Image: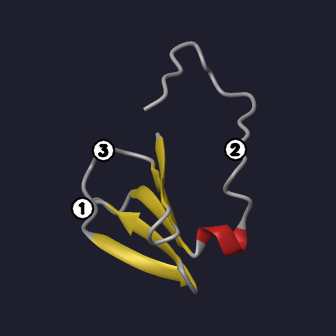
Amino acid sequence: MKINYDKTTDSLYIHLSDRPSVDSDEVQDGVVLDFDANGALVGIDVQHASERMDINSLSVSQLPLGQLMAA
């Protein structure tokens, strides 16, 4: 899983898989779910992210961080 934030567009994207998305569904204004060819969720796009959450802090808990790496 990768999390990317684009400051110029104020969008946060959570990559759940490396598989390409072929379909999308806007489940709430500015929140889009991306699906692969099999209908599996592969990503979550949050527009106007800084208006929805504090993007300056990220916390993780109870994750297997043995191979944590920063991009």
Give amino acid for label 2: Leu
Check disc 1 and report its element: helix, strand or loop. Answer: loop
Q: Is residue 48 left or right of residue 18?
A: right
Identify residue for label 1: 37
Q: CA distance from mark 3 to mark 1?
A: 13 Å
First in sequence: mark 3 or mark 1? 3
In the rendered image, residue 65, in percent from the top left (x then y), is placed at 61, 20
Mark 3 neighbour class, 10 Å CA radius: few under 14, some 14 to 19, many 20 or more:
few
In the depicted view, which residue is nearer to us: 60 or 58?
58
Residue in the image at 37% along x and 75% along y: 24
Q: Is residue 64 left or right of residue 11?
A: right
Q: Of discs 3 and 1, which sits in the foreground?
A: 3
Q: Are marks 3 and 1 in contact (CB under 8 Å)?
A: no
Identify residue for label 3: 18
Give amino acid for label 1: Ala
Mark 2 neighbour class, 10 Å CA radius: few under 14, some 14 to 19, many 20 or more:
few
Q: Residue furthest bottom?
A: 29
As drawn, the label of residue 58 is 2
In the rendered image, residue 66, in percent from the top left (x then y), is placed at 57, 13
Q: CA distance from mark 2 to mark 1?
A: 31 Å
Check disc 3 and report its element: helix, strand or loop. Answer: loop
Q: CA distance from mark 2 to mark 3?
A: 22 Å
Check disc 2 and report its element: helix, strand or loop. Answer: loop
